[in-house]
Image (tube, helix red, strand yellow):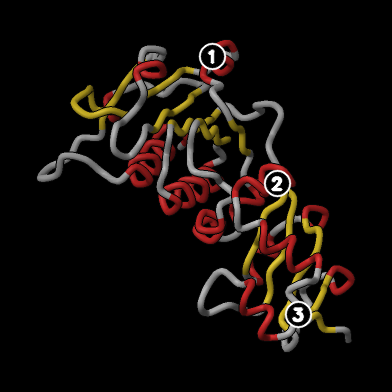
Amino acid sequence: MDIIVSEDNKLYKRANKLKDKKYRDESGEYLIEGLRGIIDTPDEDIKVIIAREDFCDARINESKVVYFSQKLFGKLCLTENASGVMAIASQRYAAEFISDYVIYLDRIRDPGNMGTIIRTAVACGYEIVCDGCVDVYNPKVVRSCVSALSKARLHSGNLIDILIEKGYNIIGADLGKESVFSSTKPQKVCIVIGNEANGISEEILCKCDNVYTLPMENMESLNAAVCAGILMYYFRF
């Protein structure tokens, strides 16, 4: 078994550069750290698996594995308690909308919120639009998603007009409006969740068919990911 030990190695440099968004955008690749994320990602999306020299698990595709020394792997890994394996995978964005359910994220910036929303969207069968958001392939988002990212139908950019043209009922989440639980459930729905600090932009808010709030006691607002989760479940089931 050959073991890579040098930081001059091309694969090491390639993987290390994927910590930077600019290189992720240029290459169309991203890093997955951890066995679960690798196993749950389609094999055709996995370009190469990087394993620590002492790592062994029959569930990964051995033909794609390259072994790094413990020291070199430690320099590359993104977490303190690394599991001993990571992979370089292809980013994937959907070209068309095929579901009747879409969650539109307007400038969501927190990686934890983004990861939680993606996991919930996958569980509920929603496609996801990221408009001016934190990079979904940011390592923090990837870890927060666990294995959901490989199952998500992702779209990027300002696509609100396209969704309107396709007949989606655009529903905004905002404070001080009518309770969502008194609303009807349209057949095709696009839920808009705004920026954590500033809410939905005026450009998108004025294009919403309806704007609803979540009724609450003793609190003024909820976390964006919690709000998104409640609304996705309400309109889907």
> Against 85, is 160 above or below?
above
Q: Position of residue 172 (x, y in %)?
A: 36, 24
Residue 57 showing in the rendered view: no
Residue 99 placement: quadrant: top right
Q: Is residue 119 visible?
A: yes
Relative to residue 143, is residue 28 depicted above or below?
Answer: above
Labelled pair 2, 3 in contact (Cβ < 8 Å)? no
Identify the residue position indicated by label 2 in the image. 91
> Which one is earlier in the sequence, the residue at label 2 or at label 3?
3
Between the residue at mark 2 and the residue at mark 3, the CA separation in whole angstroms equals 24 Å
Question: Residue 161: which disc?
Answer: 1
Question: Where, by quadrant of the figure, is residue 125 drawn?
Answer: top right
Q: Position of residue 174 (x, y in %)?
A: 28, 28
Question: Which one is earlier in the sequence, the residue at label 2 or at label 1?
Answer: 2
Q: Earlier in the sequence, mark 1 or mark 3?
A: 3
- In the picture as drawn, the residue positioned furthest to the front comes out as 8
Q: What residue would you read off at disc 3?
A: 68
